[in-house]
Amino acid sequence: MSRCDFKIVLLGSEHVGKTSLVLRFVNCRFNHGIPYQNTIGAAFCAKTLQSNGKDFTVGIWDTAGSERYEAMTRMYYRGAHAAIVCYEPGSLASWTRTRYWLQELKTVEENCKIYLCGTKRDLLDSGAVTRAVDEDIVATYCQELHGHFLTSSKTGESVDELFQKIVDDCAADLHLMRAVEDQRLQLQKEELAYKSKNKEYCLC
Amino acid sequence: MPSLRMEQSELKCKNGCDYFGNPQWQGYCSKCHREQLQRQRRAANKPSPSSSSASATLPKPERKSEDRLKLTSRSSFSKFEEKRLRQSETLKKANLLKFSMFKKGGSTDDHDHSDKKPEFKIPSAVNEAMKREFNQRFPALAGASRDVRVCVHALALDVLKCARAATADELSERVQGHYQRFLKHMDVSPHFAAADADTKEALIDFVEKHAMTYLHDLPSVVFSPSGTDDERLDARMCERIQSLGWVGAKHLDCKISNDQRARAPLYRAIAELLSMDSASSPGGKLACVRRCCAHVMRLCGAPASADDLLPALIFTVLKANPPRLISNINFVTRFCNAQRLMTGEGGYYFTNLCCAVSFIENLTAESLDMDKEEFDCYMTMPASIGGSSWAAALSLCAELKDAEEQSELVQSLKQQVATIEARATELANSTDVFQKEIEKKVADVLAKTPLEIKPRRELPRFGKFQNIKSSPLIDLDTPPTQEPPERDVPDTVETKEDSAADQSQHTIVPTEITFGEPAKTNILGLETPELQSPHNTEDNWVVKQTNSMELLNSSPLGFTSFDTRSIDELLTPDEFGDNLPPGLSNINYDIDLSDFSADNSAADDLPKPEKDPFSPEGINKDVFDPFVVPKVRDPFSPILESFDQFSLVDSKSNRQSDPFEIVPRPSDPFSPEGLQPEQGFGDAFSPMPVASASTPAQRPLASILDDSDSPTTACLLPTPLLPQQDKPT
């Protein structure tokens, strides 16, 4: 599956659950009986999703969360359609790093849609972990972003919703782009037709 | 870039003859240099040889003006021009390209560029290969083949044109622009109406692959283009990786087990990474990277996330130290279809590789989580120590692996040899057993049935029997058959006369009949038993044939004459058959085919003919007795006894005197001995033969088979008779 319609980058510090999120998304739903071809790793995953009755293939790029590779992550989100910035509500450190990426994305990739994703919701719900990140702060950040989801890769809660929303948004964007492009093509065609007509006249 | 750029005038021959100069020749071209040398030598000997100097040392501007003039008028420069064209043809592509690259920037000769332009064409071999591959891969888009090739051509041409002037980034933009244009063209053009999104992607890849494969091999055009410091970076990177040879898996936190067996994917990954350099298209290089990463992921253990992949990849790159790594990466980033590089799977792995390279470039003590001093200590260590130790370990591992494989192979071969040996001995044993068995069997058979040489069977015995048997029959037969034609039917007699008159003709006819008969009998399939060896027939047939002929002549198919006569004389065709094989077969023919009735069918006839050659006398006589009238027989009996087969001929002279024998002799017109009797017969009916001879209508009746007059034969016996008719005529 070399062709992808959308590119989604997963960002987040180490052990925040990026890979689990991808695995959950890729292996659980939408199986369609077709085994996923890339069983070796979860670094790059491609999956076909439906939006508005159309199929879209999304390529999900996992990134290394280790701080030592932080400088290189910019390469990953080059030309990305969407980015999922993950944080762990129970860990303040992961949240602080999130702010770095948000900053980066806004400056480097303006067209990239950013989704905030709090992971390990099951731990939060069961009370094993106490919330360390203030909800209000997250809410204020989210105002500028395209969405915020609290997911649990363990239970699969709102994982699919997250990706579905991304695809829908991207598809809507694409649709708009297509419409513009179509109009441009139409104009081009008309121009061509006009030219060829003119040619006929010229021959006389 | 500016340092490399030089004026065209600097490159050209100082004489301005449009050849390129060479510093070795003091900036002249070879010819001018030679002339210059000669001139100098002559100048040393004589003062001012004006003739040679006039052509050789024209000042530069004048040359230029003449150069322009040359376009319109044929001057002495045409010679130069021809030479140069010839040279340009022989020049290699790459050289040509370099020259033209420099030349193009020159402000002076515009015509020169137009001269060389056709040389930029993609070689026909490349074009053909492209066409073939396109037809193979996209058979549904045959109409688009030309579009694609035109795009590839335009791309290559554009790149070659701008390769000198533009920087690598501009070139990259142009190429990307070409991709975009082609993509849009596919949207618009009707040729690509049938292509879906995936096919379009493949088509772009196709264009990219072919254009870039062609351009890749040209030096300094797209791969580490002139004007970039890719090569320098390559060298630096190589050194850097060498100096980091000491970095191990534990420094990078990668989960690579120390078990050498588990490291097998590492070697494969390294091999893939090294093979990236040999791939010539961005797509090919990307595929190499992808395969390499797949091996790396296997190395990490499933499911590997990006957290595992990146360190392992860094480790792999460090150990592989691939040649021209930066050039390769830049080539892909510049000239690969950006869309794919950005979104696809290959793009992801390539990005990882870029990250790895970038990490290695910027590697510091912190990024390895180690002490600054320790790091410096490692870095100051001669590169050969750290690097070579690992390289040695690596090569050792590879050797070990090889050795293991070899030993496994040896083991399997050993087993094979053992099994083959076992089977060989088995085979030897079985052959021994077989031989013994065969010997025993042969001995048994020999014991059971010893070879006895018996005396040869004597054929003459049969001959004697036959002679005894046949001779009386002939004599008996002949008189009755002969007598009726004479008295009753004059027509038959005429034929006899006719036959007697043309002796030679008649003798020929029967022989032909005998040859024709086998074919006939075969066709019918009924009379095969009648076919007798020529030896048998020769004994009697001369006489008998005549008899049958007469009988048949008198009764052309279905006429009463034959039947009545045969009944009257009590001579059925069967009886005739005993002695007259050819004649009988003729009779049977007629009967079978005229009626197709059971009464006359050959079924009755079949057994009897079989008997006659070999049947003993007694049986024949038994059969014979009831049919033959005794009173006719009695007078012949003395003659029967006295007669031999061979005595027949001799007795002819006597026969005329015999009261009984008058009739039979003339009946055989085919017998060579029949001369005398026929003469006698002819005398008796002298007027008749003349009449018969005069009427040609009776000629065909000479043989029964020729009676084409009768309607029945015409209808019923077309095929078997035809060859017969043909032969006499």
Image (cartoon, grey):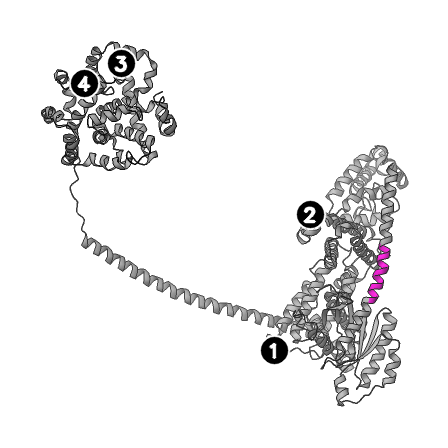
Which numbered circle lies on residue B128?
2
Q: Main secondary structure of the magenta part?
A: helix
Determine whether the residue tagged by mark 2 lies in a helix, strand or loop. helix
Query: According to the image, label 3 marks what residue?
Result: B501
Callouts 1 and 2 close, C-beta under 8 Å: no
Coordinates of residue A92 in the picture (x, y in percent): 82, 85
> Which amino acid type is marked by label 3?
Ala
* Marks 1/2 same chain: yes
Query: According to the image, label 4 marks what residue?
Result: B663
Q: Nearer the viewer, mark 4 or mark 2?
A: 4
> Which amino acid type is marked by label 2?
Glu
Rounded to the nearest angstrom, the CA distance separating label 4 from label 1 is 124 Å
Residue B535 sits in which quadrant?
A: top left
Q: Nearer the viewer, mark 4 or mark 3?
A: 4
Q: Which residues are magenta?
A: A172-185
Residue A3 sits in which quadrant?
A: bottom right
Rounded to the nearest angstrom, the CA distance separating label 1 from label 3 is 120 Å
Residue drawn at point x = 26 percent, y = 11 percent:
B688
